[in-house]
Amino acid sequence: MVDLKTTFAGLELDTPLVVASAGITETVERLRKCQQHGAGAAVMKSWFEEEVSRKSPTPRFTVLRHDLGGEDTFTLMSYEQASEWDIERYAEEVRRAKAELSLKIIPSINGLTDEGWVAAAKAFEAAGADALELNTSCPHGSITFRGGAVEETIFHTVELVREAVSCPVIAKLSPMLTAPLTVAKRLEDLGVQGVTMFNRFTGLDIDPETEAPVLHGGYGGHGGPWSIQYPLRWISEVSPKLSLDIAASGGVANGVDVVKYLLAGATVVQTCTAVVMNGYPILRQLLDELTEWMAHKGYARVDEFRGKATSRIVGTYQVDRRHKAEACIGEGFGAPCKAACPAGVSAQSYVRLIAERRFRDAAALIRSKNPFQSVCGRVCYHPCEEACTRTALEGAVRIRALKRWVLDWARERYPLLEHLPEKAASTGKRIAIVGAGPAGLAAAHDLALRGHAPTVFEALPEAGGMLRTGIPLYRLPRELLDEEIAYCRALGVEIRCNSAIGKDVQLGDLLSDGFQAVLLTLGAHRGVALGIPGEDAAGVDYAVDFLRRLNLGEQVAHGSRVAVIGGGNTALDAARCLLREGAREVFLVYRRTRDEMPATDEEVRAAEAEGTHILYLAQPTEILAEDGRVSGVRCVGGYLGAPAPDGRRTPEQLPETEYLLKVDQVLLAVAQHPDTAALGSLEGLETRRNGVLVVDDAGATSREGVFAAGDAAGRPGSVIEAIAHGKRVALAIDGHLRGEPVSLPAAQPSRVDRSVHLRAALKRDPLPPLELSELSAAVRVQSYAEIELPLTEEQAVAEAQRCLACGCGVGCSQCVSVCVYEAIRTVGDKHEIDPEKCDGCGLCTHRCPNRNISMVPVGA
């Protein structure tokens, strides 16, 4: 059971918390609130002999906020003057307080003459004061600025009052003394029962606009969390050498600060600013936190730990100066944008480099991550932007547009094929990769960089997979794709087109033909039927087949009124291409609502702007034909029922809502699967019902030496997710070829706590995102020109400067900036500690906004 009772200046207090002299202690009503919330004593608002100081100006409070590199603190600057009362009225309030309250009442006196000091002391003692505090150093009229001998004035005043009264006397010391210990010792000799260490500093702030002092001249009192260290140090020095009691004062913000003062040897702890800023209930909070700490430590009474820290303060020559610790930066603690990227691309890093106009560095960093970065700068669904901290504020940073801009900038000045990265020495290991899509080529790229020799077998006449056959030209110019495929070839990736596995090359022959591993990355090129009557009619096709023929330059037939059935990006792409090919009307038929559409919002908005009619909650039940050719689609209205096992709500039909959509062509885009049956022999390969290969976390199939990635392994079908999985499986293959265990990256990488960055951003002026320019719908539907227009350099820099640099690594680099030993080196988009240079100072651990740096034993 914790007991907070203590003794101060001969007074028995229920708690060691004393409310300091201020407006919060002026009247009995305010003193009662101090008592109700647990204070053991209160020092009443000061009585001043000097009448001019009895009237406070308005306003008389201001809060000075300090932001140094994101570290926040504040100063409460006050010009609140003394009590308005004369001696008689003040004494009357003392008598009333003693009659109505149980907490100890300590009047505060600030005299101007010897007679004034003595008269007030006698009057207040006679009124029943439990003790008197002599306010010899009030910041609003400090003796420090009156030109006299400060310490001698204090001694003289105390001696006068001590002789005049018999009640306990407490001297409130100024923090602007040259030798607090000497002063305290002399006061002890003069017979005071306690000292308060310290009064507030007399301070000044200046308004640069008005070029004048803030708050009525230069005698404001300054208090706040910053002010605790000075009294804490002096109390720890004085308390072991004195027998009088000490009231600590300054900087109390929470219960931990109360604990600190008591550990330093304080008898009681005064608080003022905390109450002024938060109200009287904070007194109970301080006491509750003190009680919790004592219970946690096993202390029953305050006396058991008071002054305990003083014996642990060593002298200058006893300080352990050995180099025992060094900094260590945590792993994988990235910005939300990086954590959200399936491929782990550090968007923060290149965005901040753009903000600093380090365009070449930004492009180099992006290019190092995967071979299809220009592709991603056009077609990625940018999960990084959804995760961006600014999404919760004015809107996400336009990360994808910035990537596109800086890579286009670098393409003109530092051509990709002229700046190839270094490769590891040849291992002599060969890998066969089936499928030249994003997963296969990303894996081939990484394996080539690791010194292996990948050969990619592609059934189509050109490499690229879905990047070439599934994405329209208005989203992805072919010259960019061709350039990045050529880059893969330049790294040593062999690509054999018109080489279909199961037809031109047999899967079973690859492992016996000098390849040490096989990676299957067949794309989801096989459309899935609806399973309704009429799908065999002429004019019914799969959207994926339509797009493939169109993108490979083949002749494609299209109707006048076309229905595209589905709600994914393939469906949207097909619909938008049909309009460009000359279809008069295009209807997108989707059985759920817009919120459930797999297609991105921007694709849906663009399709609607171009003229695609989207029918939601429409369920096709039959495709009608006349003379063997499509004439319409019979649909029924629906609603969303209970969730299915996958979590998505099941479309249900509404009775009597059937209608006919008259069309002359239907494209099916409800799903796509990889055609693993085309592999021929699947001996030893376990597949699922939809043809997807069964793999483990590393992409290994049930057959030794055979791996799968991307669509073939059932992974999500976006470009960036295919690239990410190809890279992941390449890492596993590398370990397999070397016969070494491999550590795969976490599926859900750790990310920073965004709250600290949100709080910092809220203190700044709002910065809305850049409005991206694009061709009008009427213009763009006439061709396959890119829709989104490029940024200007100034637009790119301004938008990049919106980045809050939330995560660790390049882009934040706070640790690099503050390390005078240059012990933090940059490796890719990360920072590492150089133990040969780290001096163990520990500053970086405190300046890291994400608290991702710790001190560890040297050599750990």
Image (cartoon, rainbow, N blue to C red):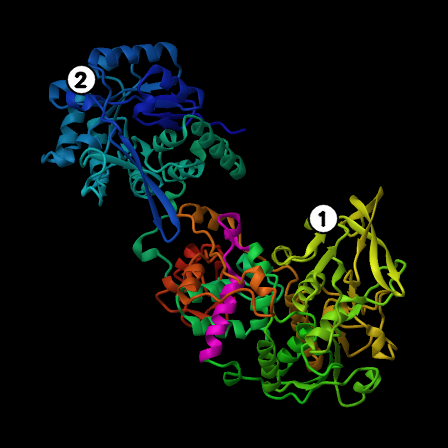
The N terminus, quarter of image: top right
**What residue type is disc 2 on?**
Ala
Q: Which of the pair 500/843 is nearer the observer?
A: 500
Residue 212 versus residue 836 in the image, above or below: above
Is 145 drawn above or below residue 191 in the view shown? below
The label number, if any, that marks residue 593 in the structure image: 1
Residue 375 falls within the magenta-colored stretch: no
Within 10 angstroms of label 1, few (less than 14), some, or many (20 or more) residues? some
Residue 696 picture location, percent across and down: 76, 67
Give the residues drawn in magenta, as a range.
388-413
In the rendered view, tell whether residue 7 sits above or below residue 351. above
Callout 2 secondary element: helix
Dominant secondary-structure state across the stretch colored magenta: helix
Mark sitting on residue 164: 2
Left/right placement of residue 757 relative to residue 233 reads right
- Which residue lies at the image location 62% right of the left edge and 80% below the top edge? 485
Separation (CA) of disc 1 from disc 2: 87 Å
Dot 2: few (<14), some (14–19), or many (≥20) neighbours within 10 Å? some
Q: Can the viewer see residue 642 in this picture?
A: no
| Position of 418 relative to 296 (above/below) | below
